[in-house]
Image (cartoon, rainbow, N blue to C red):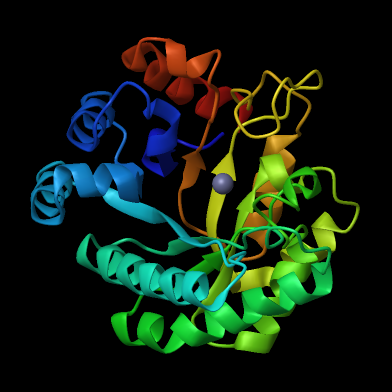
Amino acid sequence: MPGIEKLAINQATTRDRWTLREAIEGYARHGVRGICVWRDKLAECGVSQAVRLLSDHGMTVTGLCRGGMFGGADASTWRATIDDNLRAIEEAAAIGARTLIMLAGGLPKGSKDLPGARARVAEGIAEILPAARAAGVPLAIEPLHPMTCASRGCVTTLGLANDLCDELGEGVGVAVDVYHVWWDPALDAEIARAGDRILAFHVNDWLPDTRDLVFDRGMMGDGVVDIPRIRRLVERAGYDGMNEVEIFSAENWWKRDPDEVVAVCIERHETAV
Ligand code: ZN
C-alpha cells in the first residue's frame, strides 16, 4: 500500500470549507505534501502569496485545475477561451504545477456535431501548445465519463485522449481519473499505451447508486472501483507521481469538517488505494 509521501489532495476535496491558504496549511498539518490547486482559489489568494505558502510548507503542486473547455459556440467565445487557457499556463508555471489539467468541454449550445466538437479540442490545444511548451507546463488531457459528454467532456475515453497525444506530440499527456475510466474495457491497454505520458493519477470512487454525475463522488473504498489494480497499471506504465484524491461531493464530504476529511483521505489512501 502506498505511503503518505505519495498522497496529494486535490483542493476540490475541501473546496467549500477551505481557502487555498487553509488547504495548504491544513494538508501540511496532517503530513500531506501534495496539492492540486484550483484557479478560482488561486485568484482569491493571489499568485505571489500562494507561491510563498506552497514553498513554506514544502508542497508538491501536482497540478492546476483547469484549462480547456473548448465548447464555445462563436468566435469571440473561442478567443476568450484561448486567452483564458494562456493565462492558466502562466499561473501553472508561476506556482510550479507539474501539469495543467485540461477538460475538453462539451458540445456548443444547440450543436449536435460531436465529431466537430472533438476536432475543436485538438485545434484548441494545438493553439496553446507552443505557449505551454515555452513555459515548461505539460498539458494533461483528462477524459471524462461519457455521461458528461454533452456538458463538459467530449473526450470520453482514455483512447481518445491518447489519440490526441499522438496527434499533438511533445508537451501533451493524460490525466487518469479512476472515476472517469474505471468502466472502460480498453482501460488496461490504453494505460499501457499512454505510458510515460500519464501526468496525473486521480483517485476517488464510483458509488453504484450515485445521485449526481459530477458532485457525488465517493471516498476511496466506498464504491465499486478496484483502485489498487488501476494504480498498479499506471505504475507499470511508468507513472511515479503522486496519487491525488479528488472528491466532488456536495451532499457528503463537502459538508464535513475538512480536518476529518483529510484524516479519512490519509487512512483510505493507505487501505484502499
Ligand atoms: Zn480528475
Residue 193 visible: no
Give the x, y percent position of residue 16.
37, 24
Choose top left, top right, bottom left or bottom right for residue 164. bottom right
Q: Position of residue 1 (x, y in %)?
A: 56, 34
Q: Is residue 269 left or right of residue 229?
A: left
232 versus 5 height, above or below: below
Residue closer to the observer: 68 or 243 = 68
Viewed as shown, does residue 116 lie left or right of 40?
Answer: right
Residue 125 vs residue 170, the one in the foreground = 125
Q: Based on the displayed image, in which of its 4 quarters is residue 272 positioned?
A: top right
Which residue: 58% across, 66% down? Answer: 72
The relative height of residue 272 versus residue 184 in the rendered view (above or below) is above
106 with respect to 259 (left or right): right
Q: Quadrant of the C terminus?
A: top right
Quadrant of residue 262 within the rendered picture:
top left
Instruction: Kindly identify the residue that appears in the image at 28 percent across and 24 percent down.
Output: 30
Mark count: 0
**At which x and y percent is residue 201?**
56, 51
- Residue lying at the far right in this picture: please name it: 185
226 up-or-down from 35: above or below: above
Residue 139 can be seen, yes or no: yes
The location of residue 229, given as percent across then percent down, is 74, 42
| Residue at image location 31% in from the left, 64% down from the top | 92
Instruction: Answer with left or right where residue 144 lies relative to residue 169.
Output: right
